[in-house]
Image: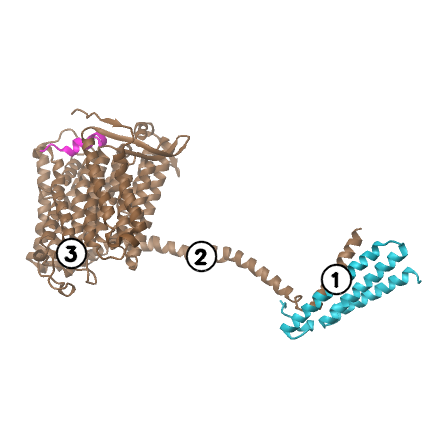
Amino acid sequence: MPALEYYIILSIILFLIGLFGFLSRRNLIVILISIEIMLNGLIVLFAAISHFTKDISGYIIVFFIIAMAAAEAAIGLSLVVLIYKRLRTVYSDEITNFKG
Amino acid sequence: MVEKHFEIVTNFNIYVFLIPFLPLVASIITLLFGKRYFRNKSQTLPILALFFSFLLSVKILIEVIHGKIYHFDVYTWIFAYGLKVGLGFLVDPLSAAMMTMVTCVAFLIHVYSVGYMEGDPGYYRFFSYISLFVFFMLMLVLSNNLAQLYLGWEGVGLCSYFLIGFWYQKKSASDAGKKAFIVNRVGDFGFALGIFMTFYFLGTLYYNEIYPKLPEIANKYIGVLGYEVHVPFLIAFLLFCGAMGKSAQFPLHVWLPDAMEGPTPVSALIHAATMVTAGVFMVCRLHPLFELSDAMMFIVAMVGAFTCFMAATVAPTQFDIKRVIAYSTLSQLGYMFMACGVGAFIAGMFHLLTHAYFKALLFLGAGSVIHLLHHAPDPNDIRIMGGLKKYMPITFWTFLIASLSISGIPGFAGFFSKDEILAQAFFSKYPWGKFIWFIGWIVASMTAFYTFRIIFRAFYGEFKGWEYVHGKPHESPRVMIIPLIFLAIGSIFAGWIGVPKILGGSNHIEEFLAPVLGHPRIIHEVSHSTEYLLMLLSVGAGLFGIFLAWLVYIKKPSLETFFSKNFKPIYTFLFRKWYFDELYLYTIVRPTLWVSRKIIRGIADNTIIEGIVNGSARVVNITGTGLRILHTGIINHYTTFILIGILVYLLVYLYLK
């Protein structure tokens, strides 16, 4: 089993990949996937810390995050479907109804 | 002479209370339900209310004659350290006489209006307003304190405004209403200051408390702008400002001729018989105050004399029948003030009472003719009348009676009252009495001249308004004629209550009013032969005026234009009413408008206030325009801002930690 530091680095890399995708991609579905990646980074972090400290509460939080991520993905995707139905696009730079 | 002993009743008396409040109730009900439910039956309630008011007034008057005075408070509105303001009634000989006259004339004019206003779309409105007017007038007359007098004073002004602008679709009518209201405002401002002064110096607004306190201020002086001003003069002058406005005396007389835009019954009731006499009534009511200052008496006399003379010179040049009578009203009000100014308060009140009858009759007679010609573009123009004696006999005879009365022909009401004024002015203890008599004597003949000018132009000669009447000219409906007859009776017999002693009368009115107004301030040695001579002179003046009118308008019509042709500048000066309207236009109206437009609107409003309001809007606008750049509508940008925000927050958090 590798040391805790590697898990933390993996988790940070996952989070930054997700953050980068979240900020830079135009496709709403990809943005949702990026959010999932960020969440996965967190899950890895919690699970690793829980494992090394022998504390079960980290695992519990992991389950909560997974449940929440599932719900979030479901709602997010259905919103994307609705946006597509109404605006005929899923690219965020084409949806500029809020332009001031 | 034995002073009459009065029994003072201080208990609440429902009859006195009902006299003003019946018309008020009728007015409110008519206003609320008139449009939908009463429509052309709107006259019923006000007329019934007025009739009962009149009966009650007569009942109260008889009780007052038999030595009762009602003086009671109904309710106190404000009571705060000396200041007492409330509703109260004082029925003494002065107010009883005035009250009976008001209800009587008002009742007759209500009846007349049924015919005159028939078919008018504002029929219910008219009756409601005119009843409301009677309520305020009675409140004014019957009040026992200055605050309630002021209520009535403003109330009648308000109703006058409503009724002058009654046909508000007509520009000239609504303008005239505004003019009346604004001019009165000037006077009423002074009146309000006068009431404040009264309270400041005397500490009360109730008449019965004012009178005993007057000696305290008789020799008091107060510094105003570096001058020592006699306190009674100051108070009386401020109060008199109100009287000048309401009673249309120079320099605030300009609204009354314009007020003739209102319906004729209104002109008769408000602008001849009752409201405009409120000023005289007020001066009489507060006569001990006015008498404390000789300078004030002089001003009252001079204002009266000037108005009297000025109006009498304008009247013969006008062609609008109602305007002629309006100037005649100005002139007669001038007489009343002249009487007050020489201390002949009783004569002034007496003339007020007789004048109410014959002037109302003149107006209603004119109204009867106007009613006939109401299809003409200008039904008031005496140039389209003529020869109406044949077609409208009752109107003619009643109008003639009123004219004889106002001209001071013996036997008619106007003779006794006018003669009383002239005689008492001549014998007055005030040094300006002789001058006042002279003015009054001159004006007496002018009055006769212009009144008979109307008679000869409207009722004699050939009828010239054929194109405006359907078929032959005809007499007005009976509902209009009967009030004329009653007023004609009043115009003859109202004077008989004051037949002077030298004609074998007993002068009841003087006996009746003396306990309130005191005996005339005349010098002691009055020679009867001089008195007869004065009477002869004033009758002669009246007859001369009538003769002159007959000469000019019947005998030698070529003389008609003699004056206007040969003395053109003077004629134009008189025809333009001494240029008072123009004078006020250039000295007051235009500068006020200029200041309002340039200073108030241009600088204060447009620059400062709008600057603040629009400026704050513009700041928000500019900030918003700047921030719009950040608001792209693209979600990715927003998320970037969120990230930056979180980072900044974290940095700050870590830094502070």
Residue at x 16%, y 35% (from the top left corner): B424
Reply yes or no: does residue B515 show up in magenta: yes
> Could you say whether the residue bearing mark 3 is in a helix, strand or loop?
helix
* Span of residues in magenta: B505-518
In front here: B511 or B585? B511
Q: Answer yes or no: do the residues labelled 2 and 3 have beta carbons within 8 Å?
A: no
In front here: B183 or B170? B170
Left or right of B626: which side holds A1?
A: right
Task: Give residue B365's position: percent from left, percent from top.
Answer: 15, 52
Query: Picture quarter containing residue B196?
Result: top left
The residue carrying pointer 1 sits among few (fewer than 14), some (14 to 19) or many (20 or more) residues within 10 Å by Cα, namely few
Asked whether the viewer can see residue B339, the reply is no
Report the number of numbered marks.
3
Asked whether the viewer can see residue B349, the reply is yes
Residue at x 68%, y 70% (from the top left corner): A80
The chain ID associated with circle 3 is B
Task: Give residue B642's position: percent from left, percent from top.
Answer: 72, 62
Q: CA distance from mark 1 to mark 3?
A: 92 Å
* Chain corresponding to brown in the figure: B
Q: Are marks 1 and 3 on the same chain?
A: yes
Type of amino acid under label 1? Ile
Task: Give residue B587's position: percent from left, percent from top.
Answer: 34, 53
Residue at x 8%, y 55% (from the top left corner): B389
* Chain corresponding to cyan in the figure: A
Reply yes or no: does residue B95 show up in magenta: no
Type of amino acid under label 3? Val
The residue carrying pointer 2 sits among few (fewer than 14), some (14 to 19) or many (20 or more) residues within 10 Å by Cα, namely some
